[in-house]
Structure formats: structure tokens, C-alpha cells
Image (spheres, rainbow, N blue to C red):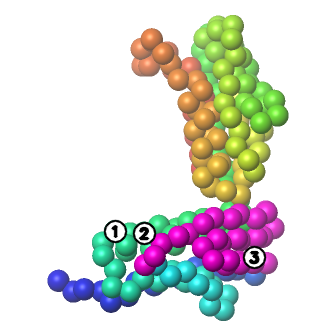
């Protein structure tokens, strides 16, 4: 089996985006805002070369090779987030009880879910914008992919069916697309 002596991933920084490296902290700024994240490891090297960020490891083991690929993916997502952003679309579905949804500050509120009197709530994380369109479409947008995805998951999880057959009672809020 061939042993690799070096793994190197390059993340290109497009025009209009700036990347700063301060110790283990990487900050990427662009038209949609700024994202900071800490990348710390004793064996991995992260440095800036020209208009790109480089993730490098010498004589990697399997887990170290995987971590280098993970860092590469995180950096690419940060660049995509500050240039294009991320958008998740969810659909509100109900059959008998008309469910209403609204955004109140940093909280997403679901009223009349299965006729319940107490509204269900979901947290909206920092840097994420949630809009309700046409009463049945929820659009979650933001620059940080993790926060956008977690907010969409919080909204979807707030309408889980308890003590009923999920095949029959299919009311809820479901993810229909990610962009």
C-alpha cells in the first residue's frame, strides 16, 4: 500500500472576498457578511498563500487525512456563504386543523398544531433570517451553513408527531429544498 507523504487542499478566495488568518482563527468577509471559525490542530497547518487558503498535513494518518478534508469543506462553505448565502425552503402541511406560523423576534411560533392550545416554538439562531410566504412556505436564509441548517431543523423538529401514527397524521413542517 502506498503511503502519502503530504495532503494539501487549496481553497480559492474569489474577488470581493477577504480572508484573514489570526493564529487558529479564520475570518472570511464578503458581500453577505463575515464568518469566523477556529481551526486548531497540532499536526495540521493552515496558511494563506496568494489568493488562497491552504490546509496541509505531512505524513497523514487516516483520521488526520479526514480532518484535512473536513477543514477544506468548512472553508469552502464559508466562502460560499459570504458570497451566495444558503437558503432552505420548508413547507407547512396540515389536513384538518389550519396551522398558522409566524416569526416573533428570534423565535418561530406554530399555532393550532393538531388543535393544540399551547403554541410550539423553535429558536432562530444568530445571522439567520426566517420569512413566511403565502402562509405555507417558510424560507430560511443566512451566510453560515450550520446556523441555517440548524434553524431549519429546529423548525422541522418543533412539529414532531407524538402518540399518533405518523403514516396517518402527516401534519407538520417539512424541508423541501436546500440551495
From where the camera sits, is residue 114 visible? yes
Q: Name the mark nearer the viewer: 3 or 1.
A: 1
Asked whether the residues under the numbered discs 1 and 2 touch, taking CB atoms below 8 Å apart as contact, a structural biologist would say yes
Q: SS class of the residue under badge 2?
A: helix
User: Compared to 100, does 51 lie above or below?
Assistant: below
The residue segment tinted magenta is: 16-43
Q: Residue at x 60, y 47 (%)?
A: 149
Q: Earlier in the sequence, mark 3 or mark 1?
A: 3
Q: Residues within 10 Å of mark 1 (few under 14, many from 20)?
A: few
Q: Is residue 148 magenta?
A: no
Q: Name the mark nearer the viewer: 2 or 3.
A: 2
Secondary structure mostly seen in magenta is: strand
Q: Residue beneath label 2, please?
A: 67
Residue 17: mark in rendering:
3
**Spatial CA span between label 2 and label 3:** 25 Å
From where the camera sits, is residue 80 visible? no
Q: SS class of the residue under badge 1?
A: helix
Residue 63: mark in rendering:
1
Is 115 left, or right, of 131 in this rendering? left
Residue furthest left as drawn: 1
Find residue 37 and report its horizontal and vertical position in percent: 63, 64
Q: Residues within 10 Å of mark 2 (few under 14, many from 20)?
A: some
Q: SS class of the residue under badge 3?
A: loop
Residue 90: mark in rendering:
none
Is 40 left, or right, of 16 in this rendering? left
Q: Is residue 35 magenta?
A: yes
Amino acid at each position: 500500500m502506498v503511503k502519502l507523504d503530504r495532503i494539501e487542499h487549496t481553497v480559492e478566495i474569489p474577488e470581493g472576498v477577504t480572508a484573514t488568518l489570526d493564529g487558529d482563527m479564520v475570518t472570511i468577509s464578503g458581500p453577505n457578511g463575515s464568518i469566523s471559525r477556529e481551526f486548531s490542530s497540532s499536526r495540521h497547518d493552515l496558511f494563506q498563500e496568494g489568493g488562497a487558503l491552504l490546509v496541509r498535513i505531512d505524513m497523514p494518518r487516516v483520521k488526520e487525512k479526514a480532518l484535512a478534508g473536513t477543514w477544506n469543506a468548512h472553508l469552502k462553505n464559508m466562502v460560499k456563504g459570504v458570497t451566495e448565502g444558503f437558503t432552505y425552503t420548508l413547507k407547512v402541511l396540515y389536513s384538518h386543523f389550519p396551522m398558522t406560523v409566524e416569526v416573533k423576534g428570534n423565535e418561530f411560533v406554530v399555532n393550532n398544531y393538531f388543535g393544540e392550545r399551547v403554541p410550539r416554538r423553535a429558536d432562530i439562531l444568530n445571522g439567520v433570517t426566517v420569512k413566511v410566504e403565502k402562509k405555507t412556505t417558510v424560507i430560511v436564509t443566512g451566510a453560515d451553513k450550520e446556523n441555517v441548517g440548524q434553524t431549519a431543523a429546529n423548525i422541522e423538529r418543533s412539529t414532531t408527531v407524538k402518540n399518533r401514527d405518523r403514516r396517518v397524521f402527516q401534519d407538520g413542517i417539512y424541508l423541501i429544498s436546500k440551495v
